[in-house]
Image (cartoon, rainbow, N blue to C red):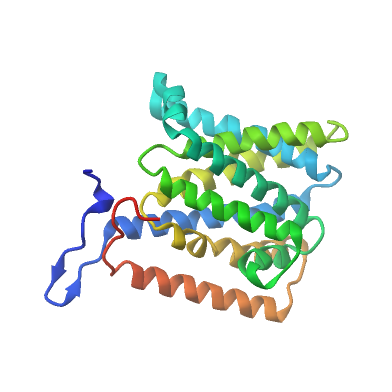
Amino acid sequence: MNDATSQPAVKVGDAVERDPLYGRGVAMIMVAGCFFSLGGLLVRLVEDAGPWQILLVRSIMLSATVFVVLVVRHRGKVFAEFRKCGITAVIGALCLGVAFTGFIFSLLHTTVANAVFILCASPFFTAPLALFAVAGFAGFAVALRWGRDTDMLALACLAGLFTAVVAAVMSPDFAMSAYDTGLCVIMGVVQMSAGMVLFTKGSRLVPAAELTLLSLTEVVLAPIWVWLWIGEVPRLWTLLGGAVVLAAIIGHAITGMRRKPAPYGAV
């Protein structure tokens, strides 16, 4: 199959030329992580809305925004694009919906720093909500790579739809203040949608095993936003852990751009 991502790197002597497509994918994934990192702060700023209410409004706005992006991209063929994604998108959307739900609930039961670092170090923790989020996000990342020859942004649209349906059933009521509603709209339209557009685009250029590593910019930045904005101070060890993670991300990205690209279809 003729795909730019399947072309081997060009060797010059014993060195391997930088892979510009990989570098572009790295940048997209890392910037997506920056958008995702704002989620903890926005949830903390919500005053009265419960987790199901937050999920409901955020998910509706995410699906609506992503659907508009898909319509702009594909015009009259947008529903054909959903069909083309097939069962892979459905599975990935269900996984992402689980991740959405687990993460929101975990944020309401611990600090932002703890929530995001539990996601980072999931094999060492047994907190059920954080593990649901980890498993869901991992399934989402793999599904993106399986379907990378299609526009898997449809997956994010379906994930928002699935989550909204569950949240609508589970929510005790739909009464929210204008302030809380506005914050949830910002989450869906800006914070989540921009992150998903960049993440799905970058996933076509980066192997699945590296997607979650590169998006750990979320883990580093999320505690900083709540620290600066609302004074939720992370512990010293949390900050040191963030520095280690950030150094690992930068080092991996730099060395990765010098490698031969993964064969097409590799996950």
From what the image shows, is residue 224 above or below residue 206? Answer: below
Residue that protrudes farthest toward the top in the picture: 76
Residue for point 51% across, 28% down: 68
**On screen, 61 above or below 227?**
above
Q: Residue furthest front?
A: 87
Q: Nearer the viewer, residue 157 or 144?
A: 144
Q: Is 170 placed left or right of 191 in the picture?
A: right
Residue 119 locus on image (x, y percent): 64, 63
Residue 8's spot in the image, x, y percent? 21, 59
- Give the camera-side residue of 114 and 137: 137
Residue at horizontal 73 percent and vertical 72 percent from the top:
234
| Residue at 55% in and 55% down | 138
In the displayed structure image, the side of residue 146 where residue 108 appears, left or right: right
Number of numbered discs present?
A: 0
Q: Quadrant of the N terminus?
A: top left
Rendering quarter of residue 80: top left
Relative image position of residue 167 (x, y in whole percent):
76, 36
Q: Position of residue 52 (x, y in %)?
A: 79, 40
Residue occupying image coordinates x 25% and y 52%: 6
Res 223 → quadrant: bottom right
Q: Is residue 139 left or right of residue 56?
A: left
**Position of the C terminus by quadrant:** bottom left
Q: Is residue 209 above or below residue 183?
A: below
